[in-house]
């Protein structure tokens, strides 16, 4: 194996695989006298000596990328004996790539992108057929998340919505930066020109239409479909403004409830849920700022705010979580039947760690 050049460095290179799609590949590059970089080899081939002088982030990048090499994916998704045969079979089955292989790759790409963002690893565009990288080939990494605000307009004929993006409080246009490349679809990570942007809690499919148009309009008869698929998913995480569409806050006392549920191998596990009036929610995401309910029979949309401070009529999510310290001790709970509930706001204090330990 080749030794890592003494003036070499690990960089991440945007690569388009003909079958697997977009990949981020770590390369060893050598800086030339004129200031340009020359690609030496993919970093997978670095010698143990070269690996030993890499930073921890560089070694992590190589490890992450090893999960979407052709050989690794063949072992994971195929019984074929050769990579060429594996790729040929994949080329005839695009649905398998879309539904199985690409989601796996994108999970690893998210790890790679986080590593790039957190550690400042250089991220480059590579021209086809060339090993030379110039200064204008490096992508600019925007380290902070993009904030999104969506405005919905509804009248008797039309449902219309617009999306505005903000970076560090300043608005920017999605249509002005070209080309647009989707690195990951959920959550969306986009290359806009030579800029890398991170869009948390939203899919690329929700964003891409606004790279070509300012607003989206549909017939008002489709409003129920768009409330389910657009309004509610966006409103859970992002700021919204509505005109002609009322989303009202429902004030309900929050009850934190523990229950025993049947688990695998004839065991039981404790499950925590939060009950707002007639609705029950699992604490599945600390990032969702609202829980939203669409009551189709009445056409009403209501939400329960989470992590709101200064509220006296209903406890906040954090207060509900703290209620997990208000439950019977383990010997008392063991007397409950398999489906019994423990209302945590009505119990004496106990040690939740002790309660949960037999089930961990």
Image (tube, grey):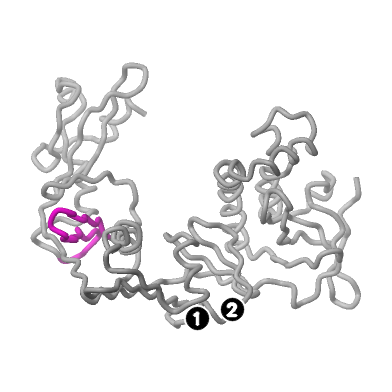
- Residue 12 in view here: no
Q: Residue at x 71, y 72 (%)?
A: 138
User: Horizontal and vertical percent for residue 175?
Assistant: 53, 79
- Residue 98 in view here: yes
Q: Is residue 295 magenta?
A: yes
Q: Residue at x 60, y 47 (%)?
A: 102
Tell me, for residue 49, which label it has, or none.
Answer: none
Q: Residue at x 58, y 62 (%)?
A: 182
Residue most extreme to the top: 266
Q: Is residue 318 magenta?
A: no
Give the labeled residue for mark 1. 173
First to last magenta residue range:
290-310
Q: Residues within 10 Å of mark 1 (few under 14, many from 20)?
A: few
Q: Residue at x 59, y 73 (%)?
A: 192
Q: Are marks 1 and 2 in contact (CB under 8 Å)?
A: yes
257 in relation to 55, above or below: above
Label 1 element class:
loop
User: Horizontal and vertical percent for residue 191?
Assistant: 60, 68
User: Horizontal and vertical percent for residue 315?
Assistant: 15, 55
Label 2 element class:
loop
Q: Residues within 10 Å of mark 2 (few under 14, many from 20)?
A: some
Quadrant where the image shows the C terminus: top left
Q: Quadrant of residue 104?
A: top right
Q: Quadrant of residue 122?
A: bottom right
Give the labeled residue for mark 2. 177
Quadrant where the image shows the N terminus: top right
181 in relation to 286, above or below: below
Q: Is residue 283 left or right of residue 343?
A: right
């Amino acid at each position: 194996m080749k030794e890592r050049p003494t003036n070499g460095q690990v960089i991440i290179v945007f690569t388009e695989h003909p079958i697997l799609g977009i990949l981020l590949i770590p390369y060893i590059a050598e800086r030339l006298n004129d200031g340009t970089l020359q690609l030496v080899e993919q970093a997978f081939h670095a010698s143990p000596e070269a690996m030993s002088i890499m930073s921890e982030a560089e070694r992590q990048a190589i490890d992450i990328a090893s999960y979407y090499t052709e050989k690794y994916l063949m072992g994971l998704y195929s019984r074929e004996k050769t990579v060429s045969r594996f790729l040929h079979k994949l080329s005839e089955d695009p649905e398998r790539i879309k539904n199985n292989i690409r989601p796996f790759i994108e999970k690893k790409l998210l790890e790679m992108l986080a590593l790039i963002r957190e550690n400042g690893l250089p991220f480059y565009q590579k021209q086809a057929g060339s090993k030379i990288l110039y200064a204008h080939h490096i992508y600019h990494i925007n380290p902070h998340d993009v904030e999104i605000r969506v405005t919905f307009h509804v009248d008797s004929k039309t449902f219309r919505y617009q999306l505005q993006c903000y970076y560090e409080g300043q608005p920017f246009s999605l249509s002005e930066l070209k080309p647009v490349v989707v690195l990951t679809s959920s959550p969306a990570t986009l290359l806009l020109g030579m800029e890398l942007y991170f869009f948390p809690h939203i899919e690329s499919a929700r964003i891409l239409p606004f790279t070509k148009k300012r607003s989206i309009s549909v017939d008002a008869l489709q409003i129920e479909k768009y409330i389910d698929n657009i309004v509610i998913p966006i409103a859970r995480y992002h700021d919204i403004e509505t005109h002609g569409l009322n989303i009202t806050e429902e004030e309900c006392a929050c009850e934190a409830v523990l229950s025993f549920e049947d688990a695998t191998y004839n065991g039981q596990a404790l499950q925590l849920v939060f009950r707002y009036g007639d609705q029950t929610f699992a604490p599945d995401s600390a990032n969702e700022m609202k829980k939203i309910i669409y009551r189709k029979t009445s056409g009403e949309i209501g939400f329960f705010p989470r992590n709101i401070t200064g509220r006296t009529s209903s406890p906040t999510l954090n207060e509900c979580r703290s209620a997990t310290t208000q439950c019977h001790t383990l010997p008392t709970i063991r007397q409950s039947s398999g489906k019994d509930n423990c209302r945590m706001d009505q119990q004496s204090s106990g040690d939740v760690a002790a309660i949960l330990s037999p089930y961990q």
